[in-house]
Image: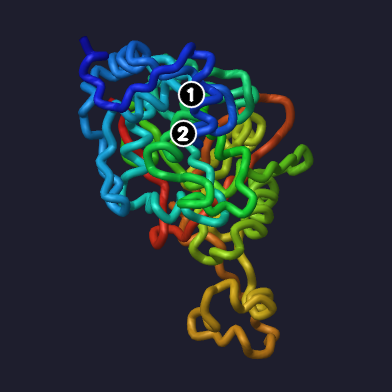
Amino acid sequence: MLADQLKSRRLQLDSSDDATDFYYAKGWTDGLPIVAPTPERVARMLEGAHLAPDTVVGTFVQRRLQVSAEKLAINAVMAGCLPSYLPVIIAATKALLDARFGLHGILATTGGAGLMVLVNGPIARALDINSGLNCLGPGHRANATIGRAVSLIARNVFGRTPGVLEKAVFGSPAKYSFCFAEDETDGRWQPLHVLRGFARDTSTVTVFPAQGSGFLIVDPMSASPQELLLSVARKMRSVHVSRFGLSFQAVLFGPEALATLADAGWTKDMVKQFLYQQATWSVAELKTRPRLCRTSEIDGIDLRSAIEPSDASRHYSIVAEPDAILPIAAGSSGQRMMLVVPSMAEYRVESEPVTQPIE
């Protein structure tokens, strides 16, 4: 039996009800009640991904740690996941362990990055991962428990223990759970995973080191795509200023916002290019905050020098390049809304979004 192959240490408790208090005392929970990871439950979870317990999912290089499917399954049980969710969690873990994501720095940042997990493709619909009404809020088991499992894995497998690797000054509710799907029903916009090189019928997860759970923009008044996107650009330029010029940001567009853009023929690539060009600071503004650029100059301009008349017309983007912007369709109808989620790292220096196919 699969349960007999499990290698993790077994604990004897009087009842499964005691597990929450015992695990909490050991520092193994996020403070919420957990499902006791009995051998039978862990075995059923592994069957959801057709994996043996000792299957190595990946390696956390900085901690010299091989990550087994068994450890992921234990945390998925604790989070309340169904076995069918485990392939998503496996793929998210592989993406987090990709060297491009820079996991060690993300886990240890004082900014308290949330591990955002975006699901694309047929599996999102098969598992009922919410992409619409309240997609970032409570009420959907898949969203809540997949995101929570990833957070518990960060704590119990990767070592994001408060006071040890965990150094967040404030933290964020996004660190409990941050998982949702993209709304792919409007065929005028390509889903994110297609923009990142995957076939539409491939299921993927994209992981992103989120600075909090996002900054809401409500804009019922803009009459054109340009006006609407300027509202987004103003928000983008005001967040993540400590990574000026190297920021990367996700932008969620609700149905009304998407319609305003798509009805006028705007593609995601056009949106990215416009936001890159508009989410900027002028040289005059940078000279008032020269340390934003981490150096005292930009393109040979001494930011410590006096402001000159031409400085107001020369601009630099807060993001590194258009591809450092991830436009995502999500949310429900109700009012024209968008959400900016800045990253907690420098683009392709400390981290970048990573997309992984789900097997």
The secondary element bearing badge 2 is classed as helix
Q: Which mark is residue 152?
A: 2
In this view, 287 is above or below 164: below
Q: Position of residue 223 (x, y in %)?
A: 73, 42
- Picture residue at 61% right of the left edge, 63% below the top: 241
Query: Around disc 1, counting alpha carbons within 10 Å, would you say few (fewer than 14), some (14 to 19), or many (20 or more)?
Result: many
Q: Which mark is residue 210?
A: none
Residue 249 is at least partly visible in this image: no
Question: Which residue in the protein does label 1 denote?
Answer: 79
Q: Position of residue 310 (x, y in %)?
A: 65, 83
The amino acid type, in three-letter code, at marker 2 is Leu
In this view, 29 is above or below 267: above
The secondary element bearing badge 1 is classed as helix
Lower sequence index among marks 2 and 1: 1
Q: Choose between 190 and 292: the one closer to the eye.
A: 292
* Residue 38 falls left or right of residue 110: left
Indicate the colouring scheme. Answer: rainbow
Asked if labels 1 and 2 touch by Cβ distance under 8 angstroms, the answer is yes
Q: Position of residue 63 (x, y in %)?
A: 31, 51
The amino acid type, in three-letter code, at marker 1 is Ala
- Picture residue at 48% right of the left edge, 47% below the top: 209
- Picture residue at 66% right of the left edge, 76% below the top: 289
